[in-house]
Amino acid sequence: MSAAVWAKHRGSAMGLLEDLADKLAQDTLAEMERLGNDRLYMDVAKALGTSSPTMQETFLTSIRIRMAEARGRMFLQTAVAALEAGKAPPTAPKGGEH
């Protein structure tokens, strides 16, 4: 860890945990896309869990948030393209109502 990262989070272990887990999640998602391996994150999570269940859960939360955002963005792009073409937008998946 760089001195700048450590200085930024001195006294804030939770902030450091979240930043490190999110950076690892971003790197993992990039490698998943590059390699075409949509389950790599599960192996990374297992490796984390052997030494820090807290880091593991924070990493998985970041993965879930980023994957959900990507699905939502893809849906938005598809819906906008359909509407701009004068077509009906796709139906939103069931189960995500709030």
Image: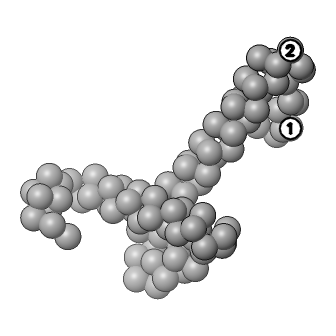
Colouring style: one colour
The residue labelled by disc 1 is: 94
Q: Earlier in the sequence, mark 2 or mark 1?
A: 2
Question: Does residue 26 appear anywhere in the picture?
Answer: yes
* Residue occupying the point 84% across, 38% down: 93
In which quadrant is the N terminus drawn? Answer: bottom left
Residue 29 in the image: state x and y as whole percent.
54, 62
* Residue occupying the point 52% across, 69% down: 31
In the image: residue 97, left or right of residue 40 = right
In the image: residue 3, left or right of residue 64 = left
Q: Is residue 41 above or below residue 62?
A: below
In the image: residue 82, left or right of residue 22 = right
What mark, if any, has residue 86 been given in the picture? 2
Looking at the rendered structure, the kind of residue marked 2 is: Gly
Classify mark 1: helix, strand or loop: loop
Looking at the rendered structure, the kind of residue marked 1 is: Lys
Residue 79 in the image: state x and y as whole percent.
77, 27
Q: Quadrant of residue 38?
A: bottom right
Classify mark 2: helix, strand or loop: loop
Question: Does residue 58 appear anywhere in the picture?
Answer: no
Q: Is residue 27 above or below residue 74?
A: below
Q: Quadrant of residue 35?
A: bottom right
Residue 97 in the image: state x and y as whole percent.
77, 31
* Residue occupying the point 54% across, 57% down: 63
* Residue occupying the point 82% across, 24% down: 82
State the separation of the CA atoms marked 2 and 1: 24 Å
